[in-house]
Amino acid sequence: MKALPADDPRSFAAQASVHCAYCDGSYSPEGFPGVELQVHNSWLFFPFHRCYLYFFERILGSLIGDPSFAIPFWNWDAPDGMRMPAMYTDRSSQLFDPRRDGRHAPPKLIDLDYSGREPRFTDNQQIDHNLRVMYRQMVSLSPTPSLFFGSAYRAGDEPNQGPGPVENIPHGPVHIWCGDPNQPGREDMGNFYSSGNDPLFYAHHANIDRMWSVWKGLDARRHTDLTDPDWLGASFLFYDETPKLVRIRVRDVLDTGVLRYRYQDVPLPWRAARP
Ligand code: C2O
């Protein structure tokens, strides 16, 4: 993927730009010139990123000739995953990105509600803190679909109507924690336009995507997808692996089984971290 020329839609450079295209004022929604299109800070957050990862994964699978390839998830919600995963921090690997915060290389533990200031926790306190953050965002603040997914954002609306709890924290803080504080905009991970340049982005977002599945499993009766037709019918354009430009709708991505993946069932230690 990295070796392909940048004008090939399947190249890493082009794939990284897809993220930029859907935020930071790059485009307007169809039919609303002058209005900014923004897939963050609203109910489009979870489905847009699922679509993005879906095509990214298919492209990678086709390039390596293995259609069963799956992007790994960075399991930052469990103690053993609360460090930058080693496979991304080996300088000789294609998964490495020099534009990261050097202070946060392993064995530093992540702070899931990092605000730009280094917390003064022992490792055990940091783990405990992170588990409480997860409980708060996934359980206390996310009792209903409309609270979990974030504010409605319909064609023609102003962007940034309001993120759901998980988009807000830990999604945002993990970005900031990874990005390089010596870059003007904390590139790569600390900024929308550049974060797709860091291979770690896709592992971070795989875990965010997993949180959507996990949340639904926490309470099968009350934790359902939204049913608003404006959400179900919202659509995005992506290049598939052939590469052809295709349109995908939110309603197409609600069942990960249809997208041919399912998350490994790993423990959720934060479920017991009720404050
Ligand atoms: Cu599109 Cu984690 O941001």
Image (cartoon, helix red, strand yellow):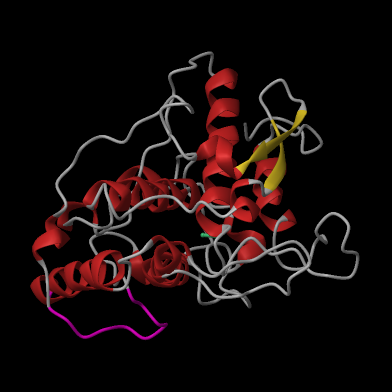
User: Was residue 114 drawn as part of the magenta stretch in this picture?
Assistant: yes
User: Quadrant of the image for the N terminus?
Assistant: top right
Give the image location of residue 170, x and y in percent: 37, 68
118 lies above or below 258? below
Judged from the image, the quadrant occupied by ligand 1 is bottom right
- Give the residue drawn at x 43%, y 50%: 225
Q: Is the magenta stretch mostly helix, strand or loop?
A: loop
Considering every residue shown, the one lying at the far top of the view is 65
Choose top left, top right, bottom left or bottom right for residue 184. bottom right
Give the image location of residue 191, x and y in percent: 59, 68
Q: Give the range drawn in magenta.
A: 113-122
Q: Is residue 115 left or right of residue 98?
A: left
- Give the residue drawn at x 45%, y 39%: 93
188 lies above or below 198? below
User: Was residue 221 drawn as part of the magenta stretch in this picture?
Assistant: no
Q: Is residue 9 left or right of residue 75?
A: right
Q: Which of 226 and 116 is in front in this view?
A: 226
209 lies above or below 43? above
Residue 138 shows in the view: yes
User: Quadrant of the image for the C terminus?
Assistant: bottom left
- Give the residue drawn at x 12%, y 56%: 269
